[in-house]
Image (tube, helix red, strand yellow):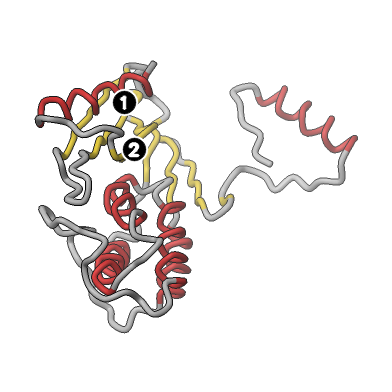
């Protein structure tokens, strides 16, 4: 259980009441929770999943120490029929599922994880090679963290983008956005649009609508 707030006295009172009702241990300031590492400094909070990535790479058992600069090649159309079907897709599904949870603190892999998740029902050798590329990228960027400064404005800054007709199977576009509260990144998403956009402008407007709903 995580208890948070800006009133230390009330937090202490809350913990005392809980101890009266339940057998519990106070582990002190938050440092690690469900694979998420939290580091508090005088400047703000850092959130990362470095140990989670290390465990993920160990489970993946990559046969080399290579790293790559980007998690996925640009302008490559990926389809269900690319490559030969994997004899056992369990490993692919397990690793992609782990990446979905990792994206909680790594917005830089939100797009590739969204793409890889579309092929979990019938992954192929080509899809698996793209998955390995994401893992090699994580190996080279394992120390990256999200930073939430203590002194920051409360002004929202929002950005959206779209890739028009990026899925060759159904011609639907992808929407993506990120939201900053001052200097803190607080929300991000990559999502396939529900309808086919007839132009890049329409795809961008759908992405803006998705972002507006999130902000509202």
Label disc, if present, on residue 65 of the rendered structure = none
Q: Are marks 2 and 1 in contact (CB under 8 Å)?
A: yes
* Residue mark closest to the camera, 2 vs 1: 1
Residue lying farthest bottom? Answer: 63
Which residue lies at the image location 42% right of the left edge and 29% below the top edge?
A: 150
Position of the N terminus, as image quadrant, is: top right
Q: Tell me, for residue 189, which label it has, or none.
A: 2
**Depicted 157 relative to depicted 127: above or below:** above
Front one among 122 and 92: 122
Q: Is residue 154 left or right of residue 8?
A: left
Q: In the structure shown, which secondary structural element does the residue marked by tag 2 occupy?
A: strand
Q: Residue at x 67, y 44 (%)?
A: 28
**Of the image marks 2 and 1, the number of the one nearer the N terminus:** 2
Q: Is 14 on the left or on the right of 58, as rendered?
A: right
Q: Which quarter of the figure has residue 2? A: top right
Residue located 39% across and 32% down the image: 186
Residue 57, quarter of picture:
bottom left
Is residue 38 found left or right of 199 in the rendered image?
right
* Spot occupied by residue 163 in the image (x, y as percentages of width and height): 16, 40
The front one of 105 and 39 is 105
Image location of residue 109, percent across then percent down: 30, 51
Q: Position of residue 13 (x, y in %)?
A: 78, 26
In this rendering, would 20 be left or right of 134? right
* Number of residues whose C-alpha sits closer than 10 Å to that of mark 2, classed few (under 14), some (14–19) or many (20 or more): some
Tell me the SS state at disc 1: helix
Residue 191 or 193: which is nearer the viewer? 193
Circle 1 is placed at which residue position?
210
Between marks 2 and 1, how big is the CA–CA gap?
10 Å
């Amino acid at each position: 259980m995580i208890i948070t707030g800006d009133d230390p006295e009330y937090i202490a009172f809350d913990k005392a009441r809980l101890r009266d009702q339940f057998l519990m241990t106070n582990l002190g300031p938050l440092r690690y929770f469900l694979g998420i590492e939290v580091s508090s400094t005088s400047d703000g909070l850092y959130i990362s999943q470095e140990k989670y990535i290390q465990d993920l790479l160990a489970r993946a058992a990559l046969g080399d120490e290579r790293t790559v600069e980007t998690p996925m090649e640009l302008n490559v159309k990926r389809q269900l029929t690319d490559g030969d079907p994997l004899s056992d897709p369990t490993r692919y599904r397990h690793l992609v599922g782990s990446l979905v949870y990792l994206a909680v603190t790594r917005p830089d892999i939100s797009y590739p994880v969204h793409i890889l998740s579309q092929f979990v029902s019938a992954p192929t050798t080509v899809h698996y090679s793209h998955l390995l590329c994401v893992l090699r990228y994580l190996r080279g960027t394992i120390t990256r963290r999200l930073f939430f400064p203590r002194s920051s404005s409360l002004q929202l800054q929002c950005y959206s983008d779209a890739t028009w007709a990026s899925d060759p199977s159904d011609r639907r576009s992808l929407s993506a956005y990120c939201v900053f509260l001052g200097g803190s990144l607080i929300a991000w998403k990559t999502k396939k649009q529900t309808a086919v956009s007839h132009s890049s402008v329409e795809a961008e407007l759908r992405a803006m609508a998705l972002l507006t709903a999130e902000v509202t």
